[in-house]
Structure formats: structure tokens, C-alpha cells
Image (cartoon, helix red, strand yellow):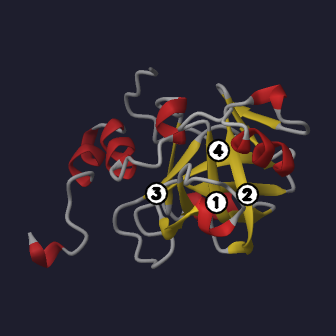
């Protein structure tokens, strides 16, 4: 586990997470945490980790049993299914993101391994859509204080679709005022 003090001065890069400030009023990105799977001069993309659809993967694809909840990965390409996994080189064309987390690769291999019972709970995570930024767009949003940037706490936490408080965990780990923000109500009038 990485010890995070106050990392709100980190720059975005592949394998880090973006955490929305608590007062960002956006139906899609309010109180979200996004794993950046790529960040370079052409742009950035990642997946929202804490927004879910009311369906399981077995309702979208030919899996015999439900393996995991499906996340709303972002507003881009939201008619397509994307995935993260911890299977590494077992999945052809995978791209290493951070720790033991990989993005994409051969979807048919994922399906085949699932049918053979070779995929453990928490080793694959599915997203409908992704979050994307054009060149310098993310940097402009950072200048407007829309996001905090943090290293990941644990790969297992990134892959866990049962944790409904990941935003609060990461916000609290930023220390200082952010620790208090982690417990701030969505609507301050309800406090």
C-alpha cells in the first residue's frame, strides 16, 4: 500500500487517478475517481471507477454467470464495452497501465477464459464507455481546480466493484482540507 500524504500537486500520468473536487456540480463527473490509462501530448483517457450501471456483465455479453458489475466508464464511446484486467500477458494485446493492471486486449480471450472458469473475481472489470480529453484539455481542467491527481492506493482497490466509497477513500487520503471534504454531504443543506 502506498502512503499518501498531500499529493494534490502531482501531474497527471498513466496509472494515476483523477479525483473530482467535492463541489464540482456535474451529473456525470461529480464525485468521481478516474484511472488514467493513457496521458500524453495527444490527450488522455481513463475509466470512471465509482459509477455503475444497474446491470451485470452477463446481461451484456455471453458469460454464463455474472462476474462483476459494469461501470459507467465515461461519456465517450458509451455504446462500447471496455475492460481492465490483472491477467497481463495471458490476454493478447494487453497494455500495461500500473502495478498489475492492464487495459484492453483480446475480448474473445476474456470470454473464453470466463467460460472455462479461469477468471477469478476481481481480475476483470468492465466499463461502458470511457473518459477522454484532447491535447491540453485535461491540463486546462486541472488549472480550474476540477481535479486532484493521486497515485493509486492499491491495484485491488481499483479492480474492486463492491467498494462504493472509493471517492471518499481517495479524497480522505489527500490530507488537510480534503480529509474533511471526504465526509462532506453532497447537498450541504442536509448537513
Within 10 Å of the Cα at label 4, are there few (<14), some (14-19), or many (20+) other Cα atoms? many
Q: Determine the residue located farthest toward the right in the rendered image.
A: 93
Q: Which mark is residue 63?
A: none
Q: Residue 126: horizontal and vertical position, in percent?
A: 64, 55
Q: CA distance from mark 4 to mark 3?
A: 19 Å
First of labels 4, 2 by sequence position: 4
Callout 2: helix, strand or loop? strand
Q: Residue 15: horizontal and vertical position, in percent?
A: 66, 37
Q: Are marks 1 and 2 in contact (CB under 8 Å)?
A: yes
Q: Are marks 4 and 2 in contact (CB under 8 Å)?
A: no
Quadrant (top left/top right/bottom left/bottom right) for the C terminus: bottom left
Residue tagged 4: 12
Q: CA distance from mark 1 to mark 2?
A: 5 Å
Within 10 Å of the Cα at label 3, are there few (<14), some (14-19), or many (20+) other Cα atoms? many
Q: Residue 53: horizontal and vertical position, in percent?
A: 51, 70
**Which of pointers 3 and 1 indicates the residue nearer the eye?**
1
**Which of pointers 4 and 2 indicates the residue nearer the eye?**
2
Q: Are marks 4 and 3 in contact (CB under 8 Å)?
A: no
- Residue 143 is at least partly visible in this image: no
Callout 1: helix, strand or loop? strand
Residue at the image point whose x is 40% and y is 59% from the top: 21
Residue tagged 3: 50
First of labels 4, 3 by sequence position: 4
Kindly indicate the quadrant of the structure image that contains residue 96. Answer: top right
Q: Which mark is residue 127?
A: 1
Q: Determine the residue located farthest toward the left in the rendered image.
A: 191
Amino acid at each position: 500500500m502506498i502512503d499518501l500524504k498531500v499529493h494534490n500537486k502531482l501531474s497527471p500520468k498513466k496509472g494515476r487517478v483523477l479525483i473530482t473536487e467535492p463541489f464540482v456540480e456535474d451529473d456525470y463527473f461529480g464525485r468521481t475517481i478516474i484511472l488514467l490509462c493513457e496521458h500524453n501530448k495527444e490527450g488522455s483517457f481513463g475509466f470512471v471507477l465509482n459509477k455503475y450501471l444497474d446491470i451485470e456483465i452477463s446481461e451484456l455479453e455471453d458469460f454464463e454467470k455474472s462476474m462483476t458489475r459494469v461501470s459507467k466508464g465515461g461519456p465517450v464511446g458509451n455504446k462500447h464495452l471496455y475492460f481492465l484486467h490483472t491477467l497481463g500477458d495471458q490476454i493478447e494485446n494487453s497494455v500495461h497501465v500500473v502495478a498489475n493492471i492492464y487495459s484492453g486486449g483480446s475480448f474473445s480471450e476474456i470470454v473464453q477464459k470466463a467460460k472455462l472458469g479461469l477468471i477469478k473475481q476481481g481480475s476483470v472489470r468492465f466499463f461502458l464507455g470511457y473518459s477522454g480529453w484532447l491535447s491540453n484539455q485535461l491540463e486546462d481542467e486541472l488549472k480550474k481546480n476540477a481535479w486532484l491527481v493521486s497515485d493509486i492506493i492499491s491495484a485491488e482497490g481499483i479492480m474492486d466493484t463492491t467498494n462504493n466509497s472509493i471517492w471518499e477513500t481517495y479524497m480522505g487520503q489527500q490530507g488537510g482540507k480534503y480529509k474533511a471534504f471526504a465526509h462532506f454531504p453532497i447537498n450541504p443543506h442536509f448537513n
